[in-house]
Image: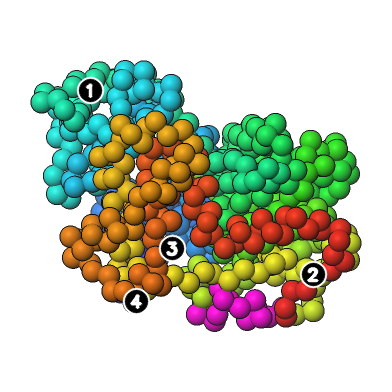
Amino acid sequence: MKNTKFSVYIPLLLAIAVVTGILIGNRLTRNSGANQPSFSMSGFNKMDAVIELIKNSYVDSVSTDSLIEKAIPLLLKNLDPHTSYIPPKEMVGVEEEMRGNFGGIGVQFSIQNDTVMVVDVISGGPSSKLGILPGDRIVTVNDTLLAGAGLKNEKVLSKLRGEKGTKVNVGIKRKGFKDLFEFNITRGEIPIYSVDVSYMIDETTGYIKVSRFGEKTYQEFMEGMKKLTQLGMKTVIVDMRGNPGGYLNAVIKMVNEFLVKGELIVYTQGHSQPRKTFNADSNGTFRDKGVVVLIDDFSASASEIFAGAIQDNDRGWVIGRRSFGKGLVQEQIPFKDGSALRLTVARYYTPSGRSIQKPYDKGNDEYYKDIMDRAIHGEFQQADSIQFSDSLKYTTLAGRTVYGGGGIMPDFFIPADTLGFSDFYSKITQKGLVYQFALDFADSNRKILSKLTNSGDFETYFKNKDMLSQFVTFAAQKGIKASNGDLKTSAKIIDTQVKAYIARNILGDEGFFPIIKNIDNVLLEAIEKSKTPIQEKSSVTVTK
């Protein structure tokens, strides 16, 4: 680890040595009386001067562009952890993710037994239109064999993705047919969804999972909420767990739908940026709906804005564990070569005035190690392991106490669930055996399973089948045997996961989430708390 850290600074040390050598050499030459061209520092800062000196006077031919590319990240490391440089080759992926689409053939795949298997085909996409089916094996792409030991997702993606309108030839092996099927596919625009699922948990409670905030997140969110409202939703559980954030505008629009005109959503302020205040601009479409927000240690940035606005306006409950603590706003400044600088320009503050940005004065390594430290200190299990000072105390509109200084603390703390963990469960998780079994089972029984249209159908189908025993046999064949004690401890969690992943392989997230709910303690608690309007409780105690 020490060697790795040291290697990061080698380019910087070399640059310093080069400049020092130039200056010493120039001084020695001047002292020897030789005539040297003068170098005017007028209009130059030190960085410009160093680059010019290397370009004009260095002993060897070097690429100053390459030096700059290496120097910029080192320079930015001295700022906050979220200011970053994005090289041109990485910008395509970043833009695709935030834009919400990419060029491709429209399939979800999994590498199973050194073979690329189509798990799902995106409805209306290029592959769907040509008749490619779940369960098909992609064997060749443009005459390149895609099979064999060591095959990685990156290689498959590099072959299947490409600009919209370009063509790719794919060779498909299908069960029951001896010869390969050849498909000449024109790549299309494939959506990257940020709302994973929306469904009704019971007659009045809806659930919607938001995984990030991109250009189309607000549109997707509104479509999901409209569907749930038509199904009779009175309260919605908005799941922000694991959501790393994204566009500020997207989250402001979403919060706006839950507030009364004039209520504060968030404000931003920085050293060079005056305060910008964002208030609800109308009575929200869902002002009459109850709302519960789920967060965890990896809910960051825009997801924390959402949770903070709901909490500070006493609009609904926040449930889960303390969020990540990213309260910094970045602007992306593009350069002509296709690269960009993502520069932190302000902090954001929740309606009560909280900055929830956690400290970063000890450097980036310590900053990102904070989550691990939380686990070591017991925060995942006990709320009272978190210490708050009175200087970080704020109040909501109704006078409830909330705290700033490092993430959003939920109104109801739910510890990380370790019930059901056993030695057997740990080993099958490490090897991904539940996922493998579910994929094999779905593939072998696809003809029957494809007739099931919702998660309820799957739960009915599983009632007469001992899926746990089948999985235990499968695991034993893979070299992992279960003791009676292991099964007594882990039976429920394994059985539920097996069924949920089988359903996902047929119906996608619409099949997965309603089943996995049965072992999701945070969600189960949220369902209970959703029945209690926030107005009925005058304050929430957050243990100091």
- Residue 492: give its label: 3
Asked if residue 385 lies in the magenta stretch, the reply is yes
Can you tell which of label 1 and label 4 is closer to the viewer? 4
- Estimate how packed mark 4 is, as few (under 14), some (14 to 19) or many (20 or more) residues with alpha carbons within 10 Å: few
Asked whether disc 2 touches disc 3, contact meaning CB atoms under 8 Å apart, the reply is: no
Given residues 88 and 118, the one toward you in this image is 118
Residue kind at label 1, given as amino acid type: Asn
Count of numbered badges drawn on the protein: 4
Which residue corresponds to mark 2? 540
> In the image, is residue 523 above or below residue 104?
below
- Where does the image place residue 374, in percent across and percent down from the top left? 55, 75
Please say whether residue 142 is visible from this viewpoint: no
In three-dimensional space, the C-alpha distance between marks 3 and 1, rounded to whole angstroms, equals 44 Å
- Element under disc 4: helix
Q: Nearer the viewer, mark 1 or mark 2?
A: 2
Question: Residue type at mark 4?
Answer: Gly
| Residue 90 placement (x, y as % from top left) | 41, 43
**Where is residue 13 drawn, in percent x and y?**
37, 68
Q: Residue at x 60, y 52 (%)?
A: 240
Q: What's drawn in magenta, residue-wise?
A: 376-388
| Residue displayed at 66% across by 80% down | 384
Residue at left 25%, top 40%?
444
Query: Can residue 106 be seen in this snapshot?
Result: yes
Q: Residues within 10 Å of mark 2 (few under 14, many from 20)?
A: some
Distance in Å between CA atoms under marks 1 and 2:
60 Å
Q: How much space separates mark 3 and mark 4, taking CA atoms? A: 13 Å
Q: Kindly state the secondary structure of the residue where label 1 is placed.
A: strand
**Spot occupied by residue 45 in the image (x, y as percentages of width and height):** 55, 55
Mark 2 and mark 4 in contact? Answer it, CB < 8 Å. no
